[in-house]
Image (spheres, grey):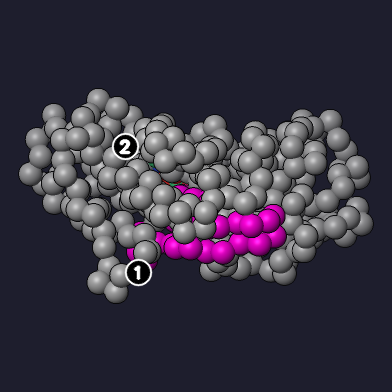
């Protein structure tokens, strides 16, 4: 059983052998945070606490597997909100004690990548890109237990950029899907975006320049051209992803590419990356949108492949 409470989804899932989904329960808190335009940590932890027991019971019920027959509990220990992580961790530790089963603490970012193994024969070695509301991590994995962080964002995460741009346009939180909807009517080639570059030659990601560019353009763009602006913004984000993936695959001599995280729920971005990967003879893999955003199947799969548990305490700033 996977248990996920790192952000604003309370989730539990039962997965067999890292491959077959028996149940997948995701209770989102989005309606409670929407009126504040973003996640309020105190509300998040309180809502997780209210929901965790019934979400776990529901996951067991829907799977048809009673709790005592679950082999192992996997839980996200970080990165995420401390007060939210602790709710999932305490629940998992308690279940482990009651049913005398192993509890394995996993990294949320690696869990995002692992969801791909449910749907594809896409095991390591691979280059993985996790693009979500809190992260942008490019990773090289040589085995299920060997990871190298190749680059990450220096400022905003890509999902955060979508959310902030949505806010500028007074669209509801979270903004990713809202921006994508409007961008569908736009021409992605109508605005030329700046390319983020660092003076020190670092290959980190950066999205704050793009966000500022959009902000400045919104001020002087008529409403009927907002779809063009948003379509061009999506193309610029997709282009940054594609360049980094291509560089990493060359450097590591690795053709397999795993795409993960909430931003990969974006149909335009995934199609763009699929085309770019095809042009460079790379093999991209991505899950359906509902498995790109936070869920507990990904935690269960990571828990299946991971050899050793991370310490079962909240690790808000956990990296690879
Ligand atoms: O992976 P996720 O559910 O949570 C984190 O671990 O952060 O990602 C949530 C992020 C939000 O910023 C949301 O706006 C973004 O993913 N997102 C999208 C789309 N759907 C969700 N971004 C772009 N296009 C989408 N369709
Ligand atoms: Zn996530």
The magenta stretch spans residue 190: no
Q: Residue at x 31, y 70 (%)?
A: 201
Image mark for residue 202: 1
The magenta stretch spans residue 152: yes
Q: Residue at x 67, y 37 (%)?
A: 121
**Badge 1 element:** loop
- What x and y, as percent, mark residue 266? 41, 36
Q: Is mark 1 within 8 Å of ligand 1?
A: no
Q: Is residue 239 left or right of residue 106?
A: left
Q: Nearer the viewer, mark 1 or mark 2?
A: 1
Query: Magenta part of the protein: which range?
Result: 127-156
Q: Residue at x 77, y 63 (%)?
A: 308
Q: Is residue 82 visible?
A: no
54 and 219: which one is in front? Answer: 219
Most prominent secondary structure in the magenta stretch? strand
Query: Which class describes the residues within 10 Å of circle 1: few (<14), some (14-19), or many (20+)?
Result: few
Please name the residue that numbered disc 2 is placed on.
Answer: 179
- What x and y, as percent, mark residue 225? 14, 32
């Amino acid at each position: 059983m996977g248990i996920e409470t790192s952000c604003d989804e309370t989730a539990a899932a039962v997965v067999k052998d890292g491959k077959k989904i028996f149940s997948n329960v995701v209770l989102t808190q989005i309606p409670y945070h929407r009126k504040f335009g973003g996640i309020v940590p105190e509300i998040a932890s309180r809502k997780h606490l209210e929901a965790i027991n019934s979400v776990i019971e529901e996951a067991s019920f829907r799977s048809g597997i009673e709790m005592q027959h679950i082999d192992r509990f996997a839980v996200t220990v970080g990165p995420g909100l401390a007060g939210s992580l602790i709710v999932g961790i305490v629940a998992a530790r308690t279940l482990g004690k009651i049913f005398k089963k192993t509890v394995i603490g996993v990294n949320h970012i690696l869990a995002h990548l692992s969801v791909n193994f449910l749907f594809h024969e896409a095991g390591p070695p691979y280059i993985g890109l996790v693009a979500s509301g809190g992260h942008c991590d490019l990773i090289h994995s040589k085995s299920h237990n060997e990871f190298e962080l190749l680059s990450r964002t220096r400022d905003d995460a890509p999902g955060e950029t979508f959310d902030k741009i949505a806010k500028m346009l007074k669209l509801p939180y979270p903004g990713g899907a809202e921006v994508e909807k409007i961008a569908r009517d736009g021409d992605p080639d109508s605005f030329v975006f700046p390319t983020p570059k660092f003076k020190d030659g670092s290959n980190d990601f950066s999205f704050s320049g793009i966000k500022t560019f959009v902000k400045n353009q919104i001020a002087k763009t008529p409403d009927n051209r907002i779809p063009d602006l948003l379509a061009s913004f999506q193309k610029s984000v997709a282009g940054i992803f594609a360049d980094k993936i291509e560089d990493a695959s060359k450097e590591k001599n690795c053709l397999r590419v795993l795409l993960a995280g909430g931003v990969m729920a974006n149909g335009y971005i995934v199609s763009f990356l699929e085309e770019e990967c095809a042009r460079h003879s790379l093999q991209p893999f991505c899950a359906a949108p509902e498995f790109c955003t936070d869920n507990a199947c990904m935690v269960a799969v990571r828990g299946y492949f991971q050899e050793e548990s991370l310490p079962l305490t909240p690790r808000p700033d956990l990296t690879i």
